[in-house]
Image: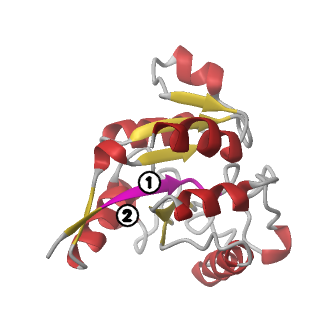
């Protein structure tokens, strides 16, 4: 029998961990944003599934390898697990439009703001008999493209001011999030869980 679930889709760099201004591809570069792990733990305990959705174009650019990105993701999950905040699924897109690559160009529709990674996650849940309730699921990120991706996918978009803080750019482009928060903790505690 199929079950319904709510999902908290999260951007990685600038939302959960600090954005260094360059690609985070070594675990030594990974530093959690204050209370982001607590925020995820609260969402999990409220019944949300946690899915990471991250553009990692450093792979196409030759800055990082798939192995390095996956090692950082494993390490991130270890850090989160220490607070009962581990993620359920993690997706990343290696494609970059300005750096053609025969192996990665097929992932063009996965690069945010395109919704390929979100749709893949939803289909992967469906294979397990789990239906994602889009109307009760959220997408949180620090960039306009995160807000746009969430909106395109029929999710509830939240922008955080950590990382790139593109609040002004969102307004300029009329890509309007449902809520703007100082950080992931505020997004979860003052908006997402307040609506549940």
Outermost residue to the right: 28
Q: At which x and y percent is residue 100?
A: 46, 60
Left or right of 182, for residue 108: left
* x then y, percent, for residue 135: 30, 42
Where's the C terminus, which quadrant?
A: top left
Span colored in magenta: 5-12
Q: Quadrant of residue 131?
A: bottom left
State left or right for residue 178 relative to residue 75: left
Residue count near mark 1 (Cα–Cα under 10 Å), binned few <14, some 14–19, many ≥20: many
Q: How is the image coloured?
A: secondary structure
Residue at 69% over, 72% down: 80
Picture quadrant where residue 22 is located: bottom right
**Nearer to us in this view, 18 or 194:** 194
Q: Nearer the viewer, residue 128 or 150?
A: 128
Count of numbered badges drawn on the protein: 2
Label 1 with label 2: CB-CB less than 8 Å: yes
Residue 22 is one of the magenta-drawn residues = no
Q: Secondary structure at mark 2?
A: helix
Q: Which residue is mark 2?
A: 107
Distance from Cα at disc 1 to Cα at disc 2: 7 Å
- Please give the residue where the numbered disc 1 appears in the rendered image: 111
Pointer 2 local density, CA inside 10 Å: few below 14, some 14–19, many at least 20: some
* Residue at 69 percent of width and 68 percent of height: 63
Q: Is residue 9 above or below residue 107?
A: above
């Amino acid at each position: 029998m199929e079950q319904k679930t709510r999902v908290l889709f999260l951007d990685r760099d600038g939302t959960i961990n600090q954005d260094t201004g360059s690609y985070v591809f070594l675990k030594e570069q990974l530093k959690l944003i204050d209370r982001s792990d607590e925020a995820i733990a609260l969402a999990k305990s409220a019944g949300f599934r946690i899915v990471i959705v991250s553009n990692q174009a450093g792979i196409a650019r030759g800055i990082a390898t798939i192995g390095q990105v996956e090692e950082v993701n494993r390490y991130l999950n270890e850090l989160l697990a220490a607070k009962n905040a581990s993620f359920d699924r993690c997706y990343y897109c290696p494609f970059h439009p300005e750096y053609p690559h025969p192996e990665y160009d097929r992932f063009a529709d996965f690069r945010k703001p395109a919704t390929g990674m979100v749709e893949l996650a939803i289909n992967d849940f469906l294979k397990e008999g789990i239906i994602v309730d889009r109307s009760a699921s959220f997408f949180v990120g620090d960039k306009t493209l995160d807000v746009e991706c969430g909106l395109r996918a029929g999710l509830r978009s939240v922008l955080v001011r950590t990382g790139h803080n593109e609040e002004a750019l969102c307004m300029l482009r009329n890509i309007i999030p449902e809520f703007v928060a100082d950080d992931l903790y505020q997004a979860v505690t003052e908006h997402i869980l307040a609506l549940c």
